[in-house]
Amino acid sequence: MEEERKGSGGNFAEVSTYLQRFEMNRRKILLYSFPAFLIVAVAISTVSIPAAGGGGGREDGLGVGKGLRFSGSSSFKIALFADLHYGENAWDEWGPLQDVKSDRVISNVLDNETPDFVIYLGDVITANNLPTPNASLYWAQAISPTRNRGIPWATLFGNHDDAFFEWPLDWFSMVGIPGVNFPTETWSAGEKDFSFRGTTRIDLMKMEILKNPLSHSQIGPTELSPSVSNYILQISSSTNPKSPSVFLYFFDSGGGSYPEVISYAQVKWFQEQSQTINPYSRVPELIFWHIPSQAYKKVAPRPKASIKWPCVGSLNMEAIASQEAEWGIMDALSNRSSVKLHCLPVLVKGENSRFAEVIL
């Protein structure tokens, strides 16, 4: 298994070539930045996917979510939001203020870009900062700008979304435990007896799916547990809803309640599913997950390097915080010519400052 682990990231030349292939598919990147004492940044990227010719129910017999279709226009625009971190420092004035600013920026992006679809690319909330058993309150707040505009969306998990609550040491000083500012629109007076136990991935996803008809998120196969957000969506032709134009693959890259990794079981699932629904690799495939693979760590520049736009993002201020192990996902992607874009957030100033960039 050790040999497999070492080899699954591919050698440097192969990984570099693979990532540079994605760099050629880079599209417009929009970075909205603010003074550090307000909200540093919310990063999004819009991707225009050319129509490739040619849903119905929520998913077909293979678990492929349908219902997304190209309109009469020639493109399908996707907005990506990464590392929003709602609920961070929920106990003081700074934290709730950042959430309000995030609401405003997300709303401006949606109004100006008018995307056909939105993807929340992990770390929607900072669960380890939430002194409440119902983190779904903050999850609902994060997706509300998209929901209120009637735009369909999907989510996947990052390493902070179900992280265990971390008790601040100064809470045990003379100051004591402060009051908590909960989202006013969703807080119920009957929920004041909070236990700091957090909310599981399953509960967060169930809440989103059951309460939001516009959500295309799915709870993935149970055999891939403890990972949850593993699923496939199909974007169909405007003229033929049965004809796929693009497949979107979502992976749970772990973190929080379990190790940061895309497992060997997830890799096998991807290989089997992609071969079944796209056996000849004729339909473009887009890949989404949160925590960068170890392969990105190999090709990224060192902090403060002179390279301004490497193939894995503008990482000139800190090194990549990659997954803990590599079990074959990069090899699986590099072996499929239909994989056109690999999308993940790459941190520029660290997650806690809410400064991220989406790489396409």
Image (spheres, helix red, strand yellow):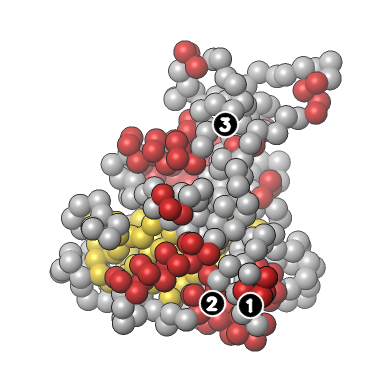
Tell me if label 3 and label 2 are in contact, CB under 8 Å.
Answer: no
Q: Which mark lies nearer to you, 3 or 1?
A: 1
Q: Residue 38 is drawn in which quadrant?
A: top right
**Image x and y of residue 265, in percent:** 49, 62
Q: Sequence-wise, which precedes: disc 1 or disc 2?
A: 1
Q: Which quarter of the rendering shows the N terminus? A: bottom right
Would residue 66 appear left or right of 332 to someone viewing this image? left
Q: Amino acid at mark 1?
A: Gly
Foreground residue among 318 and 278: 278
Query: Which mark, by number, is residue 331?
Result: 2
The residue sitting at 51% across, 48% down in the picture is 226
- Secondary structure category for the residue under label 1: helix
Residue furthest to the front in view is 1
The residue sitting at 38% across, 69% down in the picture is 272
Foreground residue among 301 and 31: 301
**Image x and y of residue 215, in percent:** 34, 46
* Distance CA(mark 1)–CA(mark 2): 9 Å
Would residue 100 appear left or right of 111 to someone viewing this image? right
Foreground residue among 178 and 100: 178
Q: Sequence-wise, which precedes: disc 3 or disc 2?
A: 3
Query: Which mark, by number, is residue 335?
Result: none
Residue 229 visible, this angle = no
Q: Amino acid at mark 3?
A: Gly
- Secondary structure category for the residue under label 3: loop
Query: Which mark, by number, is residue 198?
Result: 3
Query: Which mark, by number, is residue 7?
Result: 1
